[in-house]
Image (cartoon, helix red, strand yellow):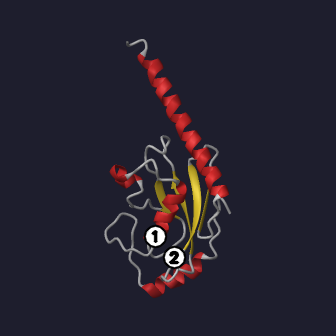
Amino acid sequence: FRAVLPFLVQRVEAMSRSITLGRINKEIQNMRKNKNPDFHAAPVSSNNLEWHFTIRGPTETPYEKGIYHGKILLPSDFPMSPPDISFFTESGRFEVNKKICLTITSFHKEEWSPSWTIETILQAISSMIPVPTPGAIGSIETPDEEVRQLALKSQTFKCPKCG
């Protein structure tokens, strides 16, 4: 058994990588096919584990004129484990360049389901932007007037990595 164990471990790791790559390729195809005017995402790394996204602020909220840019870091065993998510633009809702704590992130592995897709992750983030979560990691509270100013400011952000 000891002689076979390394071989079995290698096979399981290879199968996991294959599942991850297949799923990520499917995600890329779905994002290209199902264009949504409220958000966009695409991989920016050669291994396709780092994605950048842009989300329009939800309508009828102080965030509605915002265009918020951030990053989704997929784990090497995606979709079996949840991603890390952070924002690059100020919104008044999430800290910049800090992993945010939502039920769809690595902070809540027990809540994660492999059925979540990049698209549904973006929909969830969008729906959570106007919902305050006091005390959550990466979450901040900002007065509405400042949120509106940050929303306008977000329109001029240009990501140095993806443009």
Q: Quadrant of the N terminus?
A: top left
Indicate the secondary structure of the residue bearing disc 2: loop
Residue 4 image position (x, y, % from top left)? 43, 14
Q: Is residue 1 left or right of residue 59?
A: left
Residue assigned mark 2: 58
Q: Quadrant of residue 2?
A: top left
Res 43 visible: no
Q: Residues within 10 Å of mark 2 (few under 14, many from 20)?
A: some
**Picture residue at 44% right of the left edge, 43% below the top:** 80
Q: Quadrant of residue 46?
A: top right
Residue 41 image position (x, y, % from top left)? 60, 59
Indicate the secondary structure of the residue bearing disc 1: helix
**Picture residue at 58% right of the left edge, 75% below the top:** 154
User: Which numbered disc covers residue 13?
Assistant: none
Q: Which mark sits nearer the N-terminus, 2 or 1?
A: 2
Res 11 visible: yes
Residue assigned mark 1: 127
- Compared to residue 156, the image places residue 46 above or below, namely above
Report the label total.
2
Tell me the amino acid under the disc marked 1: Ser
In this view, the residue in front, 138 or 79, is 79
Residue 52 image position (x, y, % from top left)? 59, 58
Farthest residue, direction bottom: 145
Disc 2 vs disc 1: Cβ atoms closer than 8 Å? yes
Q: Is residue 30 left or right of residue 106?
A: right
Q: Is residue 78 left or right of residue 110?
A: right
Residue 112 image position (x, y, % from top left)? 39, 51
Q: Quadrant of the C terminus?
A: bottom right
Q: Residues within 10 Å of mark 1 (few under 14, many from 20)?
A: few
Q: CA distance from mark 2 to mark 1?
A: 7 Å
